[in-house]
């Protein structure tokens, strides 16, 4: 059974940093791309970032480019999102998502990041 | 960036009725479109990929059609568990991958 478990969410002040982690199990992690998708409370879905299986290619939404960095550790079957210079508009549930040809076939339960002073 | 526009924003129907949801792309995405279902308090679930292919375990009452810029998700006969929010997503142009704004199917 595929499982994706996010951690590292919480309350942070504007301008500060936070790092999300995602622990994957139930599939061959190193064979698949991975993504982060976020959802502000009561709002729609927004793709944030994605990374190829070998970390050779990463992509970012314009809203986070230059502030967020995606990475992965295939030996640890883990995905990460380093979030710097956080803004109030970054407040959202952040989902770790498994790639299916640039679609999303498995989702974690989400980690809530709240940016507020 | 490809913009996806979903309509209607809300669809009010009864169990047993047919639901027809629309997703329009700002430029052609060929058949590179997926549909997701999201229930309150849950993560989204992949229903349809490549416009018309059901994901594993998805009931046959869900079907997708369309290509280019106009797409439709049809639920042939609504079950109580189908009342949820539905999103379309394109993968034709990356980055970014983009979602539509969602359609809420309510009783």
Image (tube, coloured by chain):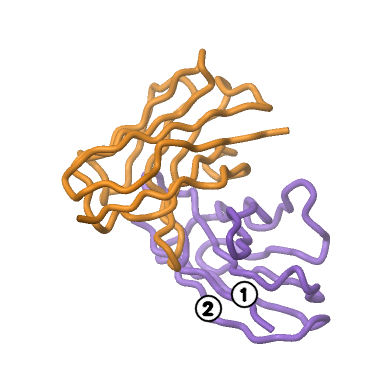
Residue in view at x 58 percent, y 23 percent: A29
Residue in view at x 67 percent, y 34 percent: A2
Q: Which chain gets the purple colouring? A: B
Q: Are marks 1 and 2 on the same chain?
A: yes
Which of the image's four quarters has the N terminus of chain B?
Answer: bottom left
Tell me the quarter of the picture where residue A71 sits.
Answer: top left
- Please tell me the numbered disc located at residue B21: 1
Relative to A22, residue A39 above or below: below
Q: Nearer the viewer, residue B69 or B85?
A: B85
Name the N-terminal-most of marks 1 and 2: 2
CB under 8 Å between discs 1 and 2: yes
- Please tell me the numbered disc located at residue A111: none
Q: Residues within 10 Å of mark 2 (few under 14, many from 20)?
A: some
Q: Residue furthest top?
A: A75
Residue in view at x 41 percent, y 22 percent: A55
Report helix, strand or loop for mark 2.
Answer: strand
Relative to A101, residue A45 above or below: below
Residue in view at x 60 percent, y 61 percent: B38
Report helix, strand or loop for mark 1.
Answer: strand
- Please tell me the numbered disc located at residue B7: 2
Place of residue A17 in the rendered image (x, y in percent of width and height, measured from the top left): 24, 38
Q: Nearer the viewer, residue A116 or A93?
A: A116
Q: Which chain gets the orange colouring? A: A
Q: Is residue B35 left or right of residue A87?
A: right
Tell me the quarter of the picture where residue A26 sits.
Answer: top right
Which of the image's four quarters has the C terminus of chain B?
Answer: bottom right
């Amino acid at each position: 059974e595929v499982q994706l478990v996010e951690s590292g969410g919480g309350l942070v002040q504007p301008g500060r940093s936070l790092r999300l982690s995602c622990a994957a199990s139930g599939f061959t992690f190193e064979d698949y791309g991975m993504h982060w998708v976020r959802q502000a409370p009561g709002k729609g879905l927004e793709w944030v970032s994605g990374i190829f299986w070998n970390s050779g290619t990463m992509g970012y939404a314009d809203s986070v480019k230059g502030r967020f960095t995606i990475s992965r550790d295939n030996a640890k079957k883990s995905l990460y999102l380093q979030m710097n210079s956080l803004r109030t508009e970054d407040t959202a549930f952040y989902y770790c998502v498994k790639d299916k040809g640039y679609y999303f076939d498995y989702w974690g339960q989400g980690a809530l990041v709240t940016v507020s002073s | 960036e490809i913009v996806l526009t979903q309509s209607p924003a809300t669809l009010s129907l009864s169990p047993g009725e047919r639901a027809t949801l629309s997703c329009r792309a700002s430029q052609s995405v060929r058949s590179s479109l997926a549909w997701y279902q999201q229930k309150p308090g849950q993560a989204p679930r992949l229903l349809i990929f490549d416009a018309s292919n059901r994901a594993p375990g998805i009931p046959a009452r869900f079907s997708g059609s369309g290509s280019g810029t106009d797409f439709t998700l049809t639920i042939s006969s609504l079950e109580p568990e189908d009342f949820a929010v539905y999103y379309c997503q394109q993968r034709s142009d990356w980055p970014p991958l983009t979602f539509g704004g969602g359609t809420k199917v309510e009783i």
